[in-house]
Image (cartoon, grey):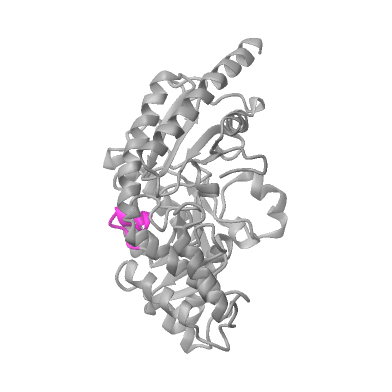
Amino acid sequence: MWDQDGRRYLDGSSGAMVCNIGHSNKNVLTAMRRQMEKSTFGYRLHFETEASEQLASKLVGLMPDGLNRVFFVSGGSEAVETAIKLARQHAVSTGQNSRWKVISRRPSYHGCSLGALAVTGYDPLTAPFMPMMQDMPKVPAPRAYLDGLNPDDPATGAHYANMLEAQIQAEGPNSVLAFLVEPVGGASTGALVPPNGYMERIREICDHYGILLIMDEVMTGVGRTGAFLGSDHWDARPDIVVMSKGLGAGYIPLGAVIAGDALVAPILETGGFAHGFTYAGNPLACATGLAVLHEIEMQGLCANAAAMGDTLLARLKSLMQKYELIGDVRGKGLLTAFEFMADRDTKAPLPPHLNAHQRFVDLAYARGLIVYSRRTRGGTEGDHILVCPPLIANTQHIDEIMHGLDASMAQFSQDIHADLKAG
């Protein structure tokens, strides 16, 4: 990307982990122009549109078996709202009115609307609005690296998954509607990959208690982790899939919620889904999404994300060996992150007042590299940097990203050590 002064930037975070096929793809822009010449709007209660029907059919073909109903929205927050309302209305339609609690994790991020915030575990975003919403129960995210546990040991996965079962029992199983989870953590946990056995165990627990498993694939979906869905890496079939970001890929606002007939049919039989948005199924958005999926398929970008992700992760681990302030490196596919720590052995974070995550982003930006940052530990401390280039990234892009990270780390380490020494 170039700014108005001609300065060049490499987008090392795909914007906000959204521009999965890069910027200004000619085939996508052509498809958008073609659709604009036909129609830019057709309200879903008045018309079926060719674009929305084709995109829905394409998405269903990419889903686990049985997920064959699609509801389009314009973004991630709308998608999460839609999913939890779909789950609730299914419960009401099937005589399970007592089920309304959606358990999620802490930390987590699921959107900024009030319903999505209620299932978000990130204090800086939720605290100001807590009096205005129904807060939902949370269980700890499986941050094995912070707890000194081996993520490769299935006992670690069971340890964290069993916290879900304990929470279900504490809430009362008949009151719990769903468990909402990011297959690989996003901005709130910095590309957190679940420990072995975790995903399979949460599927077993949800089945045992009759609870819906909702996969928030807003960031992990559409190839980001090296598979079309992040949850495809594990034997943990979702009941509802939530998608956005990479589906519109930065070309247009677009998201989707995908479920199966078993959920949708009872709702339709009892009056229909009491929910909707003006731009749901917008033909221009859907034509764009279809073109994005075509590019991902034709260019083999899921496989490229897997291969380039392995390269990037290995290079980040080498960077960790060079700079002691990097305390952990993690990720899957082209969803990767590294976390700063004052001490690797104790996992002590850098002092929050140093504002380390933003300082590093600014240093990289000054060098023409765009990365993304947040705080891992509830949003108040534990600085991490997300490195998530578009799925079209090649080895030359990885080289340039690593050069920018290395140069930025050299300056960052010097500055932080000076600040720590000064107290």
Q: Give the x, y percent position of residue 91.
A: 48, 75
- Left or right of 341? Residue 310 is left
Q: Is residue 397 above or below residue 103?
A: above
Any part of residue 144 in sight: no
Residue at the far top: name it: 421
Q: Choose between 106 and 19: the one closer to the eye.
A: 19
Q: Residue at x 34, y 64 (%)?
A: 207
Tell me the magenta residue range.
228-237
Among the 4 quarters of the image, the one containing residue 66: bottom left
- Left or right of 348? Residue 230 is left
Q: Give the x, y percent position of residue 377.
A: 54, 37
Can you say which quadrant of the picture contains the N terminus?
top right
Q: Is residue 126 above or below residue 410?
A: below
- Left or right of 14? Residue 399 is left
Can you say which quadrant of the picture contains the C terminus?
top right
Q: Give the x, y percent position of residue 411.
A: 56, 20
Q: Is residue 227 above or below residue 156?
A: below
Magenta-colored stretch includes residue 22: no
Q: Give the x, y percent position of residue 215.
A: 43, 59
Q: Is residue 213 above or below residue 392?
A: below
Residue at the far front: name it: 6
Q: Choose between 10 and 113: the one closer to the eye.
A: 10
Q: Choose between 371 and 237: the one closer to the eye.
A: 371
Any part of residue 54 in sight: yes
